[in-house]
Image: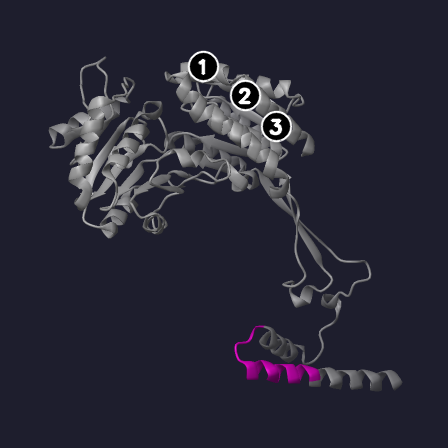
Amino acid sequence: MPERLRIIARLRQLLVREAKALSAASGRIRGVDAAQVITSEVLPLIEGCRFLENHATEILAPRRLGLLDRPLWLGGVHSEIRREPYGRVLILAPSNYPLFLAGAQLLQALVAGNAVLVKPAPGAAEPIAMLRDLLRQAALPDGLCTLLPEDPEAVHEWIRKEVDKVILTGGTAAGRAVLQTCAESIVPATVELSGVDVVHVLEDANPARAADLVLYGLALNHGRTCIAPRRLLVQRGVAGRLRTALQDRFRSRRAPVTDLLPWVSQEVNEALAGGARVIAGTWAEAEGIFRYPLVLEHLPATSRLRTEDHFAPICSFQEVSDEEEAIALDRECPYALGATVFTRNEQRGAAFGSRLPAGSVTVNDLIVPTADPRIPFGGRKRSGFGVTRGAEGLWELTTPQVISRRSENSWLPHLDAPAPGDEERFAHLLNLLHGSGLISRLTSLGYLLKRGRLNDRSNQTSNHG
């Protein structure tokens, strides 16, 4: 590991030097300006390098188990838990953040001791190819980072024949297909399958702050962020003020998007025809006219916009009476990636957030804190399982190996032949060690001490006989 961490340190300096070029490459793919890319991809990737340099050795160090809580019947046994690399890790990269998401996973897999294969999303190979080249400049040995063709169909053959672990960031359909192939080949996988993230606005929240951050989340990367806001659950005491704040801000700042999925456009049109209304943003059905970030109220409960990942700058707005109703509605969604809570009371927000079905919860912020390299990222339910990043992400890229040892001359009580009365003695031993009453435990101690003396006398008699 020391040499790989030196490579990461050199890479960090190269990323600083090439930050503009990397940002331009990723921005061209996504249609966003380089300034957004440098803050949303390059900066967190560089911070991830520093996290690994400072903490990976400690995180992956062997853990020796102490003697104080060792079971009595394992006297003389010394155990340690080691983290071993899987071998070859396949990373199936997304197109929405092709540098940061795949790059963070790549660097953690390398530091954990693996060789890595990266399959870019169609049309999104350039940034990860640039990162591979920078790793080579940082003296990464040949064969440890391989860039695969973009063809999605080839993925299944690689899983069947060539890899020991898979990391997928993508949609639900892709996740199902990959997991089926992994199951057939008994290959473990970590999958992040997007989300339909919720924003809870409690009655004491600052509506201006909530509106600013909802707009930010919808506009970031044209709404193509897995933890972008998709559902607003707003307590009635603040609903009117939040509507006004959203309308004011959406009039002054708009982020155009033209590549909505056909079913998304159809769902919006059907919802509007059925009584839903636009409370912030604008909507134009005609082909080629920009669709701006959109907040819709009175969406049908069955609308796919409330229950499926759509990667569009659209979210629903629904009033709720209290926290309990909000949590109940939140739990109806089959996805559980991230959640946000707005309240003027941080402690209340944290307590409320702990009840939400989400892998990550932010209080009075949105999206940005999840890029912290120190914390894991992952979802629940249809949003996938397993995590990347943080200490937990490093552990995810290793498999534990336990080594237990005794000295050659140590006592092996399990080799002693059973003797009359052993069952009773062990019952009293269990009561002494784990029983609930002091008198009962002392009684067992007396029994064992007495039986021990009797056994000693019996052994002495037999030895002199």
Q: Position of residue 163 (x, y in %)?
A: 58, 31
Q: Position of residue 196 (x, y in %)?
A: 31, 36
* Residue under pointer 3: 8
Cα separation between marks 3 and 1: 22 Å
* Residue under pointer 2: 16
* Residue under pointer 1: 24
Cα separation between marks 2 and 3: 12 Å
Could you tell me which quadrant the C terminus lies in? bottom right
The earlier-in-sequence mark between 2 and 1 is 2
Judge the density around disc 2: few (<14), some (14-19), many (≥20) Cα neighbours within 10 Å.
Answer: few
The amino acid marked with disc number 1 is Ala
Count of numbered marks:
3
The earlier-in-sequence mark between 2 and 3 is 3
The earlier-in-sequence mark between 3 and 1 is 3
35 up-or-down from 348: above or below:
above
Residue depicted at x 28% and y 34%: 230
Q: Which residues are magenta?
A: 434-449
Q: With 163 as the anchor, is 462 left or right in this view?
A: right
